[in-house]
Image (cartoon, rainbow, N blue to C red):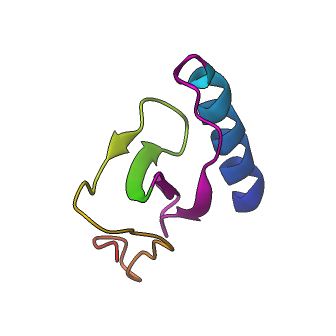
Amino acid sequence: MKKLIVLVIIFSFQFLTAQNKTYFVSDPTISPNSDFVVFEYEGDLWKVPADGGTALRITGMEGEESNPVFSLDGKWNA
């Protein structure tokens, strides 16, 4: 069920941002309490509510961030 939610969110995000030419979102990870999805886009990590909404960039430094992982309690993301 969680994988289905993640796929729906990713496809929804891609559809809603098609105007901005978002072509590829990768490495989605859902939080332990299923509240948020964190994914990699253009070398940065982004966070979006699991039920949809606006994605917020949570990293913006030089380099490439990928493969986000939540802590077991869901408070931290690495």
- State the image quarter where residue 3 is shown: bottom right
Range shown magenta: 19-42
Seen at 73% across and 49% down, the residue is 7
Residue 28 pos. (x, y %) = 59, 60
Q: Is 30 covered by the magenta stretch?
A: yes
Horizontally, residue 21 falls left or right of residue 72, namely right
Residue 46 pos. (x, y %) = 40, 50
Which of these two is toward me, 17 or 38? 17
Seen at 41% across and 83% down, the residue is 72
Which of the image's four quarters has the C terminus? bottom left
Which of these two is toward me, 21 or 76? 21
Residue ranking furthest to the top: 19
- State the image quarter where residue 29 is shown: bottom right
Seen at 37% across and 71% down, the residue is 74
Horizontally, residue 32 falls left or right of residue 62, namely right
Which of the image's four quarters has the N terminus? bottom right
Residue 47 higher or lower than 15, as above or below: below
